[in-house]
Image (tube, rainbow, N blue to C red):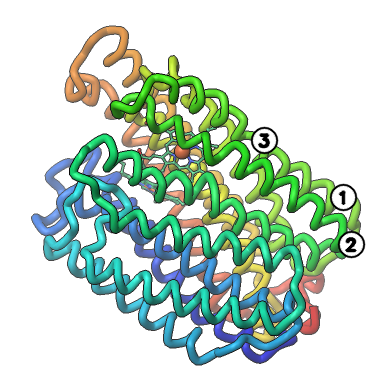
Amino acid sequence: MKYQSQKVAQLYFVGALILFAAQITFGLLGATLYVAPNSLPDFLPFNVVRMVHTNALIVWLLMGFFGATYYLLPEETETELYSPFIAKLQFWLFFIAAGIAVAGYLLGYSAAEGRSYLEQPLPIKIGIVVVALMFLFNCSMTLLKGRKTVISNILLLGLWGIAVFFLFAFYNPANIILDKMFWWWVVHLWVEGVWELVMASILAFLVIKMTGVDREVVEKWLYVIIGLALFTGILGTGHHYYWIGAPGYWQWIGSVFSALEITPFFAMVIFTFLMVWKGGRDHPNKAALLWSLGCSVTAFFGAGVWGFLHTLAPINYYSHGTQVTAAHGHLAFYGAYAMINLAMITYAMPHLKNRAPYNQLLNIWSFWITTAGVFFMTFALTFAGVVQTHLQGVVGLSFMEAQEQMGLFYWLRLIGGIATAVGVVLYIFSILVPVGARAASPAARIQPAE
Ligand code: HEM
Ligand code: HEM
Ligand SMILES: [Fe+2]
């Protein structure tokens, strides 16, 4: 760790991992309800379990982004953070707000406006904005007083974008078509727009640190990736406008531009592998390198391939809202945004804790088990979705009649989920629990300065 103020990142990473564990726990509860509908107590109905699962997901990913930013900004700008105090205060406000929101959901309080991911009651939403402003102020002031690199500029552009698009969470038009359109301005323009800028810049930071490739080369790639992301992702929003009552031309615009959305993810795969191959430097943190490569590959499959599967309007007409969507949602969120955070945490924690022997073997096992678990869930849900599409769209069964034929796949999803949960426990263990020098391989020793 080169700069003292980087230390605040640790708070964020630990907070993110706690919420990640909560997310997975509620995922397992949701999957259990799918196969045994009356197995949980009354205060855990499916809609609440699902809401906690998806909200915890978003919050831990954002918390990870905040931590990643606080970690990399001092190194990129070559200056201490503007205010470590604001960073700590902001963490506790965010963490406590998340806790209150979850407690509220369990007690039955939520803004029931039919907008997934944005169920937070108004005071919590306002709290989120305050936290975001503190964060952006702190980071922008740091950037202004320090060295300005392409990585930190693009990262901050992405983070400002996240905050700006969140403002549409406050705009709930009475017209249900407009309501849906603006809901997607948050959800879609986040994950297929500004979050991609955050992902690409964190990936670029990790690649520079671990491969030693020239910054100029990495920066050129970064421009290409974010150019492709914005060019395809903004009009790609049209793939959510097919059947909500928007004009028909969106079926063309949405199909064409969202089909191209695969390109930034493809570019990230080429970028990471090319840099690692060219760099050829033997970085001691093999686990972090594995997560970085795994991130670009899994994001390519989850977002790119599984997104493309159902993004053309004539196909989406049949697959819309089936388990195909859930399969894609899981692999895309995991590959792109969970894995980029797990890569950064794996890279940064040994430096933050100044711990030389590092339990890489366990971490590498957790990579394979978690990733295999999520892929298994994805396959189970994809098959379920294909069967569902056929039964509802071709045979003409009703939604519930089709569900009765899909039980096997839901059991398989639960099994994949249990594997995922085991992997996550191993990951958390490998990051937080120190190991004796004997347990770590010699190659696992981290040089403190890098
Ligand atoms: C990392 C990036 C991405 C993430 C995290 C993500 C996540 C999601 C999620 C969670 C949903 C379900 C939303 C809901 O209805 O509540 C969804 C829907 C959808 N996504 Fe993605 N996605 C990503 C990228 C992509 C890409 C690149 C494509 C196209 C190539 C795509 C195509 C679609 C389509 C067509 C739907 C609508 C499915 C339906 O009609 O039911 N996604 N995405
Ligand atoms: C133990 C592992 C997990 C299990 C058992 C699980 C289970 C579930 C269940 C049952 C739902 C509700 C589906 C529905 O409404 O029909 C769900 C939704 C969702 N989960 Fe998970 N999940 C797990 C892990 C994850 C992970 C690791 C991620 C991402 C990093 C994730 C992201 C999502 C998303 C984005 C949705 C909303 C999907 C949509 O709207 O289509 N889950 N999950
Ligand atoms: Fe989308």
- Point 27% across, 16% down: residue: 392
Kindly indicate the quadrant of the structure image that contains residue 433.
bottom right
Q: Marks 3/2: CA distance?
A: 24 Å
Can residue 298 be seen in the rendering of this structure? no
Callout 1 touching callout 2 (CB < 8 Å): no
- Point 85% across, 63% down: residue: 215
* Neighbours of disc 3 within 10 Å: few (<14), some (14-19), many (20+): some
Left or right? Give the position of 212 relative to 147: right
Q: Which residue is mark 3?
A: 263
* Residue that lies at the very extreme toward the left in this rendered image: 42
The total of numbered circles placed on residues is 3
* Neighbours of disc 1 within 10 Å: few (<14), some (14-19), many (20+): few
As drawn, the label of residue 214 is 2
Q: Residue 406 at what x, y percent from top left?
A: 29, 25
> Quick one: 401 or 445, which is closer to the camera?
401
Q: Is mark 3 within 8 Å of ligand 1?
A: no
Q: Which residue is mark 1?
A: 277
Looking at the image, is mark 1 or mark 3 earlier in the sequence?
3
Query: Please, what is the three-letter code of the amino acid marked with disc 3?
Result: Thr
- Point 24% across, 50% down: residue: 172
Q: Marks 1/2: CA distance?
A: 13 Å
As drawn, the label of residue 154 is none
Can residue 434 be seen in the rendering of this structure? yes
Q: Provide the secondary structure element on which disc 2 rests.
A: loop
Looking at the image, is mark 3 or mark 2 earlier in the sequence?
2
